[in-house]
Image (cartoon, rainbow, N blue to C red):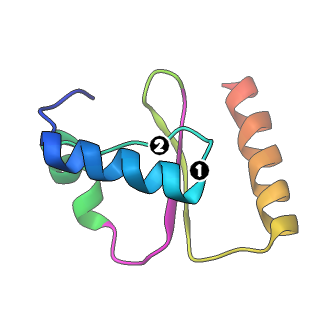
Amino acid sequence: MEGNIDEKLLELAKEIVELTGADYTNILPGKDLISGYLYKVSVVPTTIFVNSEGDILKTVVGAKTKDDWIDIIEKVMVEAKNE
């Protein structure tokens, strides 16, 4: 989804990514994403797996261990290949 992004928020997001070293893909949600999906999110952290077309593959609520994330990611990848 595309949307208008506040330039101040974009700069803040870039600063946070740089400070934390988050070298994975990050998104800054626009109004469409917030009103279309994120309004339902009530727990932090909530991790949303999406494919290259922007389809939501899986939502994971709460913190997980490294081993849990490995299992979750492997399952999401297998399921995505089978679609």
Residue 41, picture quadrant: bottom left
- In reply to whether residue 47 is colored magenta, the answer given is yes
Which residue is denoted by mark 2 in the rendering? 26
| Residue 22 visible in the picture | yes
Residue 19 image point, x, y percent: 51, 57
- SS of the residue under disc 1: loop
Q: Residue at x 11, y 33 (%)?
A: 4
Task: Residue type at mark 1: give it.
Answer: Ala
Q: Position of residue 47 (x, y in %)?
A: 53, 59
Q: Which residue is mark 1?
A: 22
Mark-to-mark CA distance, 2 and 1: 8 Å
Describe residue 74's horizontal placement relative to residue 37 as left or right.
Answer: right
Nearest the viewer among 3 and 49 is 3
| Stretch in magenta | 41-51
In the picture, which quadrant includes the N terminus? Answer: top left
Q: Residues within 10 Å of mark 1 (few under 14, many from 20)?
A: few
